[in-house]
Image (cartoon, coloured by chain):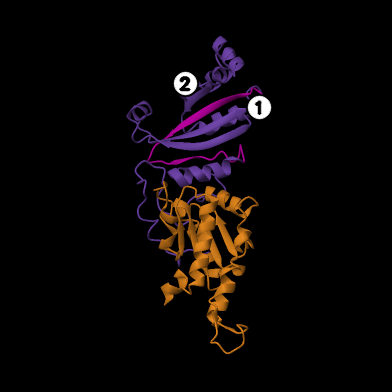
Amino acid sequence: MGLDFGPDTGTDGNIITTTIDKVVNWGRKNSLWPMPFGTACCAIEMMATLASKFDLSRFGSEAIRFSPRQSDLLIVSGRISIKMMPVLKRIYDQMPDPKWVISMGACASCGGVFDTYTLIQGVDQFIPVDVYIPGCPPRPEDLIDAVLQVQQKIASGASPKGVEAIL
Amino acid sequence: MNEEKEVEEQSKPLVLEKLEANHADTLLAQDESRGTVVVVVRKEQAYAVLEYLKTDPELAYTYLVDVTAVDNSQMESELIQFDYARFMVIYQLYSYQGQCRVRVKVPVHENDLSISSVTGLWRAANWLERETYDMFGIHFEGHPDLRRILMPDDFEGHPLRKDYPLQGRGERERFNFDKQNV
């Protein structure tokens, strides 16, 4: 939370100081609401991550929202075809700022083995991606690690990739 | 499976007998592939043959399993055999009554890509013919709604043709979001 104990004023440590930004980021990082965009086998691993065995709720990200307007973390898990890309772009645009994007698996990150006419070779050509997960498909631990990396990024005060692009 | 084979070994399949009796002039070739009768028929009479296969009470091929096509432009042997017809439109039929399959192949020349739609015989043909149109550019005359079904509406070309590059013509990189009405 970025806590610093204040100067010794004789209050026995009952006063602590911080900044508004740090408090807000602390709140944001522990209440990420993911928007799942599952189009392939990565989505199966994502479901496993959310289910009881791996339990993403241990990290404060279990409030899956199927409306982009209620979420702030987009998880792109699976192949994105050129017909699907406008849909993904629209969903990203509808999410309120600040928003983060995880590109899960080889297909979303670079097209994977599908080097064909119909498949987007990496969604980062069209939407800003904060964290990439390698793997085909990645294991649930990898997705949890990616969420933790997003949390670290938020805690450090760094801007999401989408905001950096505007700035 | 074994029973089916035994029956076929004993005698000529019923569908071949009946086609030879009633549509002999349209049969360009006949073959057998893993227990399935394969017939190649002329495009002009294809609809009549398919209608016959469906409506004949003894055959009753009431289930249209698939409509697809093959681009034979790099298959020299096929090209020579069927008067240099580039495409082969393929209908897979199944008869619940006879519990047997038949594959009807129709050669289509590149300079005349139209062929009669069979949506009037099997409603299942609607989307299957749209897919064949999308992937190969075959025009099904009389189809109620011949639009692309897999590729975006503004896509140019027919990607399962052999002359279409596997990695596309750059459409996956230059993507115009403004044009998309989403």
**Height in image: A16 above or below B31?**
below
The residue type indicated by label 1 comes to Tyr
Q: Please name the residue shown 42% across and 57% down the image.
A: A122
Q: Which residue is mark 2?
A: B31
Report helix, strand or loop for mark 2. strand
Q: Which quadrant of the figure contains the N terminus of chain B?
A: top right
Q: Chain of mark 2?
A: B
**What is the distance, in whole Å, between disc 1 and disc 2 at their CAs?**
22 Å
- The numbered dot on residue A57 is none
Name which residue lies at 54% across and 40% down. Answer: B117
Residue B117 falls within the magenta-colored stretch: yes
Chain (orange): A
**Chain B: drawing colour:** purple
Magenta residues (range): B97-123
Q: Is residue B91 left or right of residue B77?
A: right
Q: Nearer the viewer, residue B180 or B20?
A: B180
Res. B7 visible in picture: yes
Residue picked out by circle 1: B96
